[in-house]
Each structure stands twice: as structure tokens, then as C-alpha cells.
Amino acid sequence: MKYGNINARGLVKPAWQEVYKTATVGTATNLTISGLSGDTDVMYQLTTKFENGAVATAYYGTRLNNDSGANYGIQYLGAADTVLDPLSSAVYTELYTDYSGAGKTSYGKMFIYAKSGFLRLAQNSHLQSVIGTTINDTYMMAMSWNNTADNITSLFIYSSAAGGIGDGSYICLERLNL
């Protein structure tokens, strides 16, 4: 349910508005969400549930405008099994989205500041490699994309393993209407 005021274009403000949603049938290795506009959109909320359909471990990444350069910064705090797992700072080629062992499930929620002209920041929290009542890892991540000029027009979401986005995976992108 959305709460807020309706503007002249019929949009409820402030509210999250669904831009893209899919529940996969079969397997995929990647997908692209296009038709975005970081020039006008302020923030995106990406919700993912990956059913790892691969026979191998997979990690999942999100590239803004499919930029695969070393243009993303990351810092995280996690718990792997019973061990605290901090990472001070690193450079990546994507926004780290999730990780899952073969035949396992992962779930995450990421907020991305999209407005052009500013540093693009992202915050992600996710559960990794869940099977039954066992959650192998959980992480909170702070990330950035150092491109302040380009309009964000698409998100490229991919798995490191062929077929890693398995049957029953769910991906939903919402934008914040202000």
C-alpha cells in the first residue's frame, strides 16, 4: 500500500513505485533492467531472492549502466558462520549483491542513491547460502560508484555461475517518488 499525496501526474508522493519485477521460470545468468533515469530518479530499492540454479557456488553483482570497470568502492561487516568478517575497504567491478552455494537461496535488499551529479552510494544487507533453517552468512555493505556524471539508465544483474539465477528467483526494483 502506498501513502502520500497524489500530484498532477497521478503519482503518489512520497512513495516507492515498482519499476521492474520478475519471478524467473527456468535459469538465467544475467538480466538487464532498462528505462531508468538517474537524472530524475533520486533513489532505487532493489530486492533480490536468488535460487542458485547452478551446480556451482555463485556470487551476484549489479553493474550501473553495465560499467565493469574498477569504479566501485566497498566496505562491509559480516558474520560467516560464527566468525565476524569485516572488510576495511576494497575496489570492485560491481555493486556486490549476494552470494549463494549451489542449490541454496540468498536474499537481499539494496538502496542505491541514483541522482546524477552526486556520488552514487549504495547500502546492501543480505543473507547468503540459506538452506532450511541454516543461514551461512549475513552481511551489511556500504558501497559507492565513482561516476557522478553519467545518467543511470540501466542495472545489469548477473551471476558468476552459468544458470545461477535459478527457477523461482525474484527481483524487484522500485524508485522513490519525492
Image (spheres, rainbow, N blue to C red):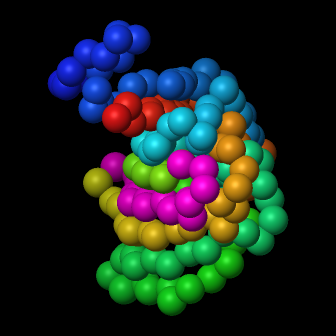
Residue 58: horizontal and vertical position, in percent? 65, 56
Number of callouts: 0
- Residue at image point 28% right, 27% down: 13
- Residue at image point 53% right, 68% down: 143
Q: Nearer the viewer, residue 163 or 158?
A: 158
* Left or right placement of residue 127 versus residue 96 in this view: left
Residue 95: horizontal and vertical position, in percent? 61, 60
Q: Is residue 26 visible?
A: yes
- Furthest toward the front, the residue is 8
Region in magenta: 115-132
- Furthest toward the right, the residue is 69
**Does the magenta segment cover residue 120?**
yes
* Left or right placement of residue 47 versus residue 167 in this view: left
Is 126 rendered above or below residue 137? above
Is 153 rendered above or below residue 82? above
Q: Nearer the viewer, residue 178 or 62?
A: 178
Q: Nearer the viewer, residue 56 or 107?
A: 107
Residue 32: horizontal and vertical position, in percent? 70, 34
- The quarter of the displayed image where residue 162 is located: top right
- Residue at image point 49% right, 52% down: 112
- Residue at image point 46% right, 77% down: 76
**Does the magenta segment cover residue 166?**
no
Task: Give the main secondary structure, helix, strand or loop, of the magenta stretch.
Answer: strand
Is 50 rendered above or below residue 27? below
